[in-house]
């Protein structure tokens, strides 16, 4: 269903630095939070390596199974890098 004009989606992002060895577990926990719309994995220099779009339905329905190929790619990426930056784009689901 399309959003009505008075139901404007509020978005914001935050950036965290994660050790490569912790990347997959951290992404799993972030994805389960529910208000995350996109994850952008970046090199420490800021160059984007991978963008992962998420939808509320992916996580709500046990969707981490759908993310399995992405998580496998993240595991391989984590093995190559000591640390990465993760940009987390979130939305405010409150429709007060």
Image (spheres, rainbow, N blue to C red):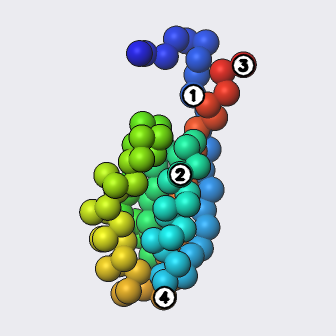
Q: Position of residue 85 (x, y in %)?
A: 53, 71
Label 1 – label 4 distance at C-alpha: 35 Å
Q: Which residue shows up at 49% across the image and 16% down it?
A: 3
The tag earlier along the polypeptide, 1 or 4, is 1
Query: Which element is circle 4 on?
Result: loop
The tag earlier along the polypeptide, 4 or 3, is 4
| In front of the other: 29 or 42 | 29
**Which residue matches tag 3?**
96
Q: Which residue shows up at 59% across the image and 73% down it?
A: 17
The tag earlier along the polypeptide, 2 or 3, is 2
Of tags 1 and 3, the one toward the viewer is: 3
Label 4 – label 2 distance at C-alpha: 24 Å
Q: Quadrant of the N terminus?
A: top left
Up-down: is 28 above or below 19? Answer: above
Res 32 label: 2
Label 2 – label 1 distance at C-alpha: 19 Å
Q: Are marks 2 and 1 in contact (CB under 8 Å)?
A: no
Characterize the local packing of mark 3: few (<14), some (14-19) or many (20 or more) Cα atoms within 10 angstroms: few
68 left or right of 33 in image: left
Label 2 – label 3 distance at C-alpha: 23 Å
**Which residue matches tag 1?**
9
The tag earlier along the polypeptide, 2 or 1, is 1
Query: Which element is circle 2 on?
Result: loop
Label 1 – label 3 distance at C-alpha: 12 Å
């Amino acid at each position: 269903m399309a959003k009505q004009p008075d139901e404007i989606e509020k978005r914001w992002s935050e950036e965290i630095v994660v050790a490569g060895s912790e990347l997959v577990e951290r992404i799993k926990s972030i994805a389960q939070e529910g208000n995350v719309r996109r994850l952008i994995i970046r090199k420490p220099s800021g160059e984007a390596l991978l963008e992962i779009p998420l939808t509320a339905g992916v996580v709500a329905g046990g969707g981490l199974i759908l993310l399995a190929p992405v998580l496998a790619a993240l595991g391989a990426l984590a093995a190559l890098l000591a640390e990465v930056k993760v940009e987390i784009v979130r939305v405010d689901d409150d429709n007060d």
